[in-house]
Amino acid sequence: MQIPQVKINYGQANKIAEVIKNLPKEEQGLNFYSFKKGDKEIVASDMYPPLNHPQAVNFFSFACLHQFAFWLGDSNGYEKPLVGLIKGKESKGSDLLWKALINSLNKNENIFEPKYLATLDSNELENEIFIDDKGIIPFQDFNKRLEITNAYGNWFLENKTSPQEIVTESNNTEKPLQSYLNQLSEIPGFSQDPLQKKALLLAMTLANRPEAYLDVKDPESWKPIIDYHLMRVALRLGLVELDGSEQGINKARQWTTEESEKRIRLAVYEVMQEIIEKSGRPMSFLDHTLWLARRYCPEMQEPDCPKCIFSTACKKDTELFQPVLRTIDY
């Protein structure tokens, strides 16, 4: 069987890097507490804990453990994003998860402690955590989520430590970020992914929060955070190009193979490293900038190209999608 070819377009990478390089430097990325609307700060209390919440690190660790697979599929492939209702408002994907989890925290402050998660059963996970206004949130990978929740909780009990303690230990090293990522690479739910998407996201969350839980003294340890949204944007921007067979599967949103997904994801990882180097901006800046871009380049609606900051440099291959594959890594 012929292996699908995936190619990086370095000329396109230079164009996108130039756009990013010329963006205002004030934007430092998501802080997982609030966002700016004009000159006004809006506290996102419906998604994140208040400042200095005693369970904040437990909350963010559990939330990032479950940052994967926010979509529904059928026998053909991708069907639609996962959507739910929280306090009367429709929320999608990661936003739905954050809002469901903050509701759980507000009802039970200790719910994300490892000792509780280690013995959590399916009924408790469904009815105390993964729940919205309509009832149980229909994750198609629920059993896997329960499995990694229990394994994650048990790991901390067996190692007689806590999410806060491994952050504190990492902060006491010369390279806190690298030390923290090394610790996470041993924890179930974070340990499977060689590109450490969820681990990097958790590190960025704790570093960017106003409390700066993770004291990053080694910014060179940041690596690209590659999820399916970023892969979709990278393909549409023309940063990564697919051959005819894989392109057809991708445009039809059909199931792909693990080998094809791996090749595409690694290519996006490499091109993001190239853009970081050429633009001189850190991954946290790229992550936020490309997150804004994917708002205008969504899964189910027509892209709103004029609103996108990459519009003049983008190849606008808007029929392209992300690789469709079930994984707990992103």
Image (cartoon, rainbow, N blue to C red):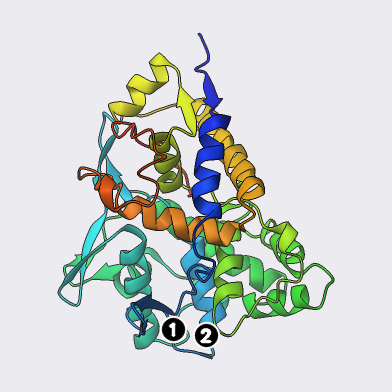
Neighbour tally class for label 1: few under 14, some 14-19, many 20 plus, Cα within 10 Å: many
Q: Quadrant of residue 44?
A: bottom left
x, y (%) of residue 146? 44, 59
Residue 55 is tagged as 2
Residue at 83% across, 73% down? 173
Mark 1, residue position: 49
Q: Nearer the viewer, residue 293 or 249?
A: 293
Q: Residue 1 or 4: which is nearer the viewer?
A: 4
**Vertical order, 109 against 70 (above or below):** below
Amino acid type, callout 1: Pro
Q: Nearer the viewer, mark 2 or mark 1?
A: 1
Q: Position of residue 156 (x, y in %)?
A: 65, 71
Query: Looking at the image, is mark 2 or mark 1 earlier in the sequence?
Result: 1
Residue at the image point whose x is 63% and y is 80% from the top: 213
Q: Amino acid at mark 2?
A: Gln
Above-or-below relation of 117 to 250: below
At 73% from the left and 58% from the top, the residue drawn is 221
Q: CA distance from mark 2 to mark 1?
A: 8 Å
Q: Tell me: 117 left or right of 93.
A: right
Label 2 secondary element: loop
| Foreground residue among 28 and 216 | 28
Query: Taking 178 as reference, is 226 above or below it?
Result: above
Residue 320 — which label? none
* Residue 248 visible somewhere in the drawing: yes
